[in-house]
Amino acid sequence: MAADTAYPGRIMTETAQRLAEIRGGVPPRRHNARTIAALTGNPGCTRRAVLDSAGVDKPKLAERVGFPARFGQSRFAITRGNAFEAQVKADGGAELLRLVAERLGVPVPDGATWTDLGGDEDRPERSRTALTASGDGPALFDHPLLGLDVAGRRVNLEPDLVAARLAGRFHVVEIKSFPIIDGQADPAKVAAAAIQSAVYVLALRELLAAEGRDPDLVSHEVVLVCPRDFANRPVASLLDVRKQLLVLRRQLDRMARIDDLLTAVPAGFTADLSADPATLAGALHGVPARYAPDCLAACELAYFCRHEARGHTGALGRPVREALGGVAEVADVLALAAGERAPEPEQAEAAALLRAAARLRADALAGHPA
């Protein structure tokens, strides 16, 4: 058998061969912290787990089937973020060190070192050596190269972050350009920063563990640095990412069992971008998906899946789907509410609530004619 470039140093297994066939034999799309974080957004979706395990280029796939993704950072946001990051890291990270130390409630240390681990030459080894060396002196490590196993492939993470070692522990420091206004930030952006930071925390813990160091030296508290109000003055806050770590580990473990996921995939399934759009769309319909409205902010195939889910209660969101007690079709919901069909035993409670809601609506319309 030929060696698979996606699995360097390994003989291509039957599973690896299957994944290569799914993506059309092209090299797998490289994951990064943002895409790994996005994997946790809908862990019950088999379609997404299979495509991500195979390394399919989902943005191109979505465009090919006629439902291109509609999210991403603007050039203005990227430029603003780079400028804010450079400001925070200026002067060897002196301001950043102060922010982190004050937020952690420890004295600002003298003699802290600043190590930029960027560049191409021997970067993995330099990162490993610097981060796992003995000693617990205060230090800041910029651009470390970390790694995680995702669906059997080693993924290199090139974070634009700082690992701060203070008081003998590491803290991941995330620098984001979204503002904190009157002590509050956009909850969705904070949530995204938390799960992305959890990727780095997990990768750094695994690096220490592989070198015989205690992984708990990496704190579950991440330092988030953002501009305060509408100025560029940085302010630091703490994010507890223990919940995100649990979700992340669970999804990575699920993707590691890719053989189990593939049992739900038809034998001829393909996401080969050279296939015609109708063939690709038909193939995707054959793999179970679990669409929810919040997929629109995290998955490149969300618009395709939303179109597919039209008429299903799942398209209205998980709370609605769960409240309806397993009634899958909107048409069935309307029929139950109108009393036009008898509910199944497990639908009795939901049907009673739907009929009560229908009566309230009818009474409200009768009392307030248009």
Image (cartoon, rainbow, N blue to C red):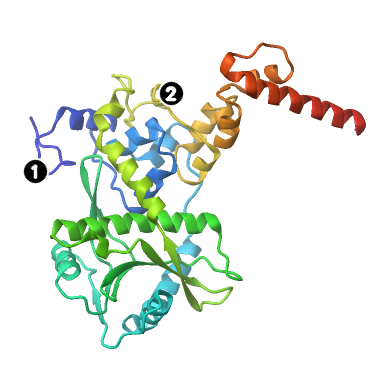
The picture places residue 132, in percent across and down from the top left corner, at 17, 67
- Whether residue 77 can be seen here: yes
The picture places residue 349, in percent across and down from the top left corner, at 64, 23
Q: Quadrant of the N terminus?
A: top left
Q: Is residue 17 above or below residue 236?
A: above
Q: Which residue is mark 2?
A: 285
For label 1, the SS is loop
Left or right: 343, with 359 as reference point: left
The quarter of the picture where residue 136 lies is bottom left
| Residue type at the position of mark 2 | His
Left or right: 305, with 51 as reference point: right
Count of numbered badges drawn on the protein? 2
Query: Looking at this view, is 123 or 274 the one in front?
Result: 123
Q: Is the Cβ of the residue at disc 2 closer than 8 Å to that at disc 1?
A: no
The picture places residue 172, in percent across and down from the top left corner, at 33, 66
Q: Earlier in the sequence, mark 2 or mark 1?
A: 1
- Whether residue 73 can be seen here: no
Q: Which residue is mark 1?
A: 9
| Residue type at the position of mark 1 | Gly
Query: Looking at this view, is 223 or 227 the one in front?
Result: 223
In percent of the image, x 54 and y 74: which residue is there? 228
Left or right: 78, with 153 as reference point: right
The quarter of the picture where residue 111 lies is bottom left
Q: Is residue 268 above or below residue 155?
A: above
Marks 2/1: CA–CA distance: 35 Å
